[in-house]
Amino acid sequence: MPPPPTASAWSETVDASQSPDHRQISPVSGHAGERFWRAIRESVLRAVVVDDDAIRLLAVAMLAHGHVLIEDVPGVGKTLLARAFSRALGLDFARVQGTPDLLPGDVLGASILDGASFRFIPGPIFTNVLLVDEINRATPRTQSALLEAMEEGNVSIEGETRALPDPFLVLATENPIELEGTFALPEAQLDRFLVRIRLGYPSRSDEAGIARRYQAQTDPLDSVGRVDAPASMIEMREAARTVHVSTPVEGYIVDLVRATRARADVRLGGSPRATVALYRAAQAAAYLDGRDFVAPDDVKALVPAVLAHRILLDIDRQLRGATAEDVIEAILHDVAVPPIEETAAEVGG
């Protein structure tokens, strides 16, 4: 069996007729993933003051064909980050505000009578990047309407299955502080999100930088340039899936997820879907680093974002102040990391 293609099968091509901010990356030569990461990071940071980790997790989710849950207090830039990311990729963007009276048809679309026949009006879900703001304010009925779309890439409306655009990424936000009038996401839906992101408050200097940007321009999004086209994104997503995962690293991924199910202080651990999510996310992360193999450090860096929201702690432990992040930290300490030599040896062979 031949070795998987490396990042050296890719390259970046620049159209001189386009602006410097519109750089297209196409499958021709080396390290396209690394160049794509540098370009998307630079473009998004022109509008948003945020840690690199948040942007990187969005890129990982897009390449791994996953979805993102952004959990944080209001006003820290969740919506701006989502809009800047979609604009940088040149993708269609739509936003839905979660409210108790939001109906599935408001998200999916509906048919209306047009003359003697019915005509389907697509809902906001028919886009590339869908921001569902405050998803936990929508009713369970509306939340469940997203399940098929997030998992299958299509929706069933009035007995007909309709395909969604590709690529398709759901960015859902929720406020973990204000719980009155909200509907907690069930475990089945939380499991559909590849990663969970928490932005946190900016530092003093970063907050001053945010204010300064709004002094200089009305809308920071105006400075975001497009770095890639949707067709190239699909091709890069397929290339990311060819990144090699050695047997020791594969075992490390499985052991980490199984460890969440073996702890007495955890009521519900990660499922096999979590294993697949960590596997694909690690491939995407390695691709963004310009490598054709996954290293143990790729896995370790992604474990909190991929697994923490899939874990339910024992009630007693929760009352004592324990968090899922504490459990993840303990698991990372307990599970043996495969030596990098073993990984390198298998890749080299």
Image: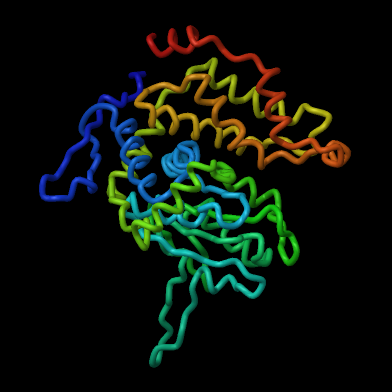
Q: Quadrant of the N terminus?
A: top left
Q: Identify the residue shown where x is 35% and y is 34%.
A: 239
Q: Could you tell whether 280 is left or right of 87 in the image? A: right
Residue 77 pos. (x, y %): 51, 53
Q: Quadrant of residue 94?
A: bottom left
Residue 186 pos. (x, y %): 70, 53
Q: Is residue 236 above or below residue 293?
A: below
Q: Identify the residue shown where x is 64% and y is 14%.
A: 336
Toward the bottom, the furthest residue is 115
Q: Quadrant of the C terminus?
A: top left
Q: Is residue 258 above or below residue 41?
A: above
Q: Quadrant of residue 323?
A: top right
Q: How many marks?
A: 0
Q: Could you tell whether 117 is left or right of 273 in the image? A: left
Toward the right, the furthest residue is 316
Q: Identify the residue shown where x is 33% and y is 19%.
A: 2
Residue 344 pos. (x, y %): 43, 11
Please name whichever residue, 49 or 227, is drawn nearer the observer in this view of the structure: 49
Please name whichever residue, 86 or 205, is drawn nearer the observer in this view of the structure: 205
